[in-house]
Image: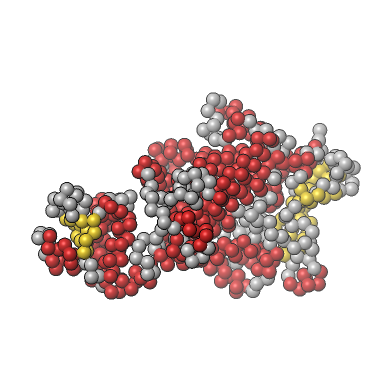
């Protein structure tokens, strides 16, 4: 070693395969900041340490002769990279140091067993995992999700929030502008402060679709992802009820993190890429954890009896917003299977998410189970692009060693020899961003368990309120309460108040003999809102009255959201919404009648309306 070299040296037992395995991994993490030498070669150079001690522990030795052994030596070495938290905990957190040293020495005393365990969990690869192919695959999937989201919304946006739509964006912006005066952007960040014409709404959707394709093919991914996030945030913040779904906020949070996960290159397939940020990988895993775990937690916390007595799936397939025909068959499964399936849901949502932070094959197991779970949901229900986006997050649990076995050579060859490093400025920026987002995410979910909302720290409240409109960190949790019936709203019009004709929707249940269809990943947002409206009354859904008024006015963009307009010549004079109860037929009834549904008239949903 050069006499002027100020780097510390980690001395380890070179005859120990277990030690060699971990040294290879630490070398990748610390890069050239730490030198690694087997004790068999250099022990004689360090007279301050007896040779037999090198057989029992690693030693991190500094040029001035000072040294650290055991767990602290490992933490000191890792702290030369971005892995500073273990050393901080060792020095600051009561009890962490003795526990770490106890665990280190237990492992050192039982190296054969832990060597076997290590090989079983991590496999035969000595080096740490790489994520180049994983990142490329993830960005392709995220680009596809963005493409679906923008194209799907673009096909409906005039009828939903256009000038003649149900809830015009222009009206929302005028109201926010009058309320917040000269600084409305920070309350409602959106590009539509520049103008909310139908043309601009459609342009943003079209531009989003085009830029999504750039991400898919790997052109300027970081810049493209930033534009996609800004465009979708702009749409989200003026979409009102029609863009208030958890997968919309999940796309915004995922898209924001992806900006800093993507390589700063113009072409990802033609130039060497630095390794993805470990902080971003951690944040994506924590995001997946939050989505899955909180979906299980809210089921328990809600006190809903159907989750407590394991009967929730007796109702789920039938009462979910837009079931598929496979959902009809799932509904026919025996009671014992449905109850065990509820238990499986709890295990998957409350247990498996913890495994996403595990190493190697533990993480692969978590990814495999969660991917299988998403495919089961895709088969039985239409949840738009939510499952596709969750699948993209799940694939981040598989490193390049796994993907190389699945992806054709021509897809991965441009990324085989990447060894370039992340620019220092980006490394420190992403590290700071990662710690900040992680801290806010953890506090967002843990503070309510320990601190009354009125006693939240002021700095935390101000930070959350500042970033809230940008949806960088969000809450999740699906199906906290299971609906046990399926009311369906239908809208009828009449010229004379005697003969009534029904408007038909594109995707929600209507004709009894029509099989529930597959529509995902497209989201028919009006059909979805009709499902939510049916669970309450029209006083709590003023947008539905607006929909009926637009139909009385003959608004073509709104009519285009429907499957059939029974009044093609001129709008009706009167209009009313009524409610039917729907439920699946059983196998016997379906065989006899060919019907997938039963229905029964329930009551009027609104009074009869007419224009003044």
Q: Is residue 446 left or right of residue 553?
A: left
Examine the rendering and report whether any part of residue 564 can be seen.
yes
Is residue 361 placed above or below 261 in the rendered structure?
below
User: Which of these two is toward me, 18 or 454?
Assistant: 18
User: Which of these two is toward me, 151 or 523?
Assistant: 151
Q: Residue 456 appears in which quarter of the rendering?
A: top left
- Image quadrant in which the C terminus is located: top right
* Residue 358 in picture, x, y percent from top left: 40, 62
User: Which of these two is toward me, 139 or 83?
Assistant: 139
- Image quadrant in which the N terminus is located: bottom left
* Residue 587 in picture, x, y percent from top left: 74, 72
Q: Residue at x 41, y 50 (%)?
A: 274
Q: Tell me how the rendering is colored.
A: secondary structure
User: Furthest-left residue in view?
Assistant: 47
Q: Residue at x 47, y 63 (%)?
A: 404
Is residue 98 placed above or below 571 in the rendered structure?
below
Q: Residue at x 44, y 64 (%)?
A: 401
Q: Residue at x 25, y 70 (%)?
A: 16
């Amino acid at each position: 070693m050069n006499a002027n070299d100020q780097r510390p040296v980690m001395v380890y037992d070179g005859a120990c395969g277990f030690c060699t395995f971990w040294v290879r991994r630490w070398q990748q993490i610390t890069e050239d900041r730490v030198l690694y030498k087997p004790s068999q070669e250099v022990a004689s150079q360090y007279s301050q340490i007896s040779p037999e001690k090198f057989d029992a522990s690693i030693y991190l030795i500094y040029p001035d002769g000072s040294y650290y052994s055991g767990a602290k030596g490992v933490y000191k070495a890792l702290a030369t990279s971005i892995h500073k938290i273990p050393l901080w905990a060792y020095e600051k957190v009561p009890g962490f140091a003795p526990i770490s040293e106890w665990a280190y020495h237990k492992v050192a005393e039982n190296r054969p067993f832990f060597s076997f365990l290590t090989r079983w969990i991590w496999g035969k690869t000595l080096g740490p995992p790489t994520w180049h192919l994983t990142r490329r695959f993830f960005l392709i999937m995220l680009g596809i999700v963005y493409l679906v989201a923008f194209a799907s919304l673009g096909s409906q946006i005039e009828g939903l929030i256009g000038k003649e739509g149900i809830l015009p964006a222009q009206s929302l912006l005028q109201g926010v502008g009058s309320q917040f005066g000269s600084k409305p952007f920070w309350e409602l960040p959106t590009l539509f402060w520049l103008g909310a014409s139908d043309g601009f709404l459609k342009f943003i959707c079209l531009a989003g679709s085009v830029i999504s394709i750039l991400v898919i093919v790997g052109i300027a991914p970081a810049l493209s992802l930033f534009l996609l996030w800004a465009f979708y945030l702009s749409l989200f913040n003026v979409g009102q009820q029609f863009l208030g779904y958890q997968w919309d906020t999940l796309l915004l949070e995922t898209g924001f993190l992806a900006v800093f996960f993507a390589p700063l290159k113009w072409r990802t397939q033609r130039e060497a890429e630095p390794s993805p940020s470990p902080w971003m990988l951690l944040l994506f895993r924590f995001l997946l954890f939050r989505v899955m775990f909180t979906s299980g937690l809210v089921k328990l916390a809600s006190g809903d009896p159907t989750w407590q007595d394991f009967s929730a799936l007796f109702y789920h397939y039938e009462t979910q917003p837009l079931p598929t025909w496979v959902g009809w068959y799932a509904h026919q499964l025996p009671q014992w299977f449905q109850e065990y399936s509820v238990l499986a849901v709890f295990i998957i949502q409350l247990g498996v998410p913890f495994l996403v932070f595990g190493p190697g094959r533990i993480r692969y197991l978590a990814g495999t189970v969660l991917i299988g779970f998403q495919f089961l949901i895709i088969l039985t229900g239409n949840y738009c692009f939510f499952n596709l986006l969750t699948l993209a997050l799940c694939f981040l649990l598989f490193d390049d060693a796994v993907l190389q076995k699945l992806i054709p050579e021509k897809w991965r060859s441009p990324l085989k020899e990447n060894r370039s490093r992340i620019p220092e400025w980006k490394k420190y920026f992403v590290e700071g961003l990662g710690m900040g987002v992680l801290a806010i995410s953890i506090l967002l979910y843990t503070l309510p368990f320990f601190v009354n909302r009125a006693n939240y720290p002021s700095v935390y409240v101000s930070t959350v309120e500042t970033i809230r409109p940008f949806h960088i960190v969000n809450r999740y949790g699906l199906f906290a309460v299971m609906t046990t019936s399926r009311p369906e709203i239908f809208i009828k019009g009449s010229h004379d108040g005697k003969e009534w004709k029904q408007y038909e929707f594109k995707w929600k249940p209507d004709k009894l003999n029509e099989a529930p269809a597959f529509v995902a990943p497209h989201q028919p947002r009006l059909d979805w809102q009709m499902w939510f409206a049916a669970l309450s009354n029209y006083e709590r859904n003023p947008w539905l009255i607006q929909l009926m008024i637009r139909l009385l006015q003959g608004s073509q963009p709104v009519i285009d959201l429907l499957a059939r307009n029974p009044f093609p010549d001129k709008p009706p004079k009167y209009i009313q919404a009524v409610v039917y109860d729907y439920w699946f037929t059983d196998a016997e009834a379906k065989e006899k009648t060919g019907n997938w549904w039963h229905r029964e008239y329930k009551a009027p949903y609104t009074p009869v309306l007419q224009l003044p």
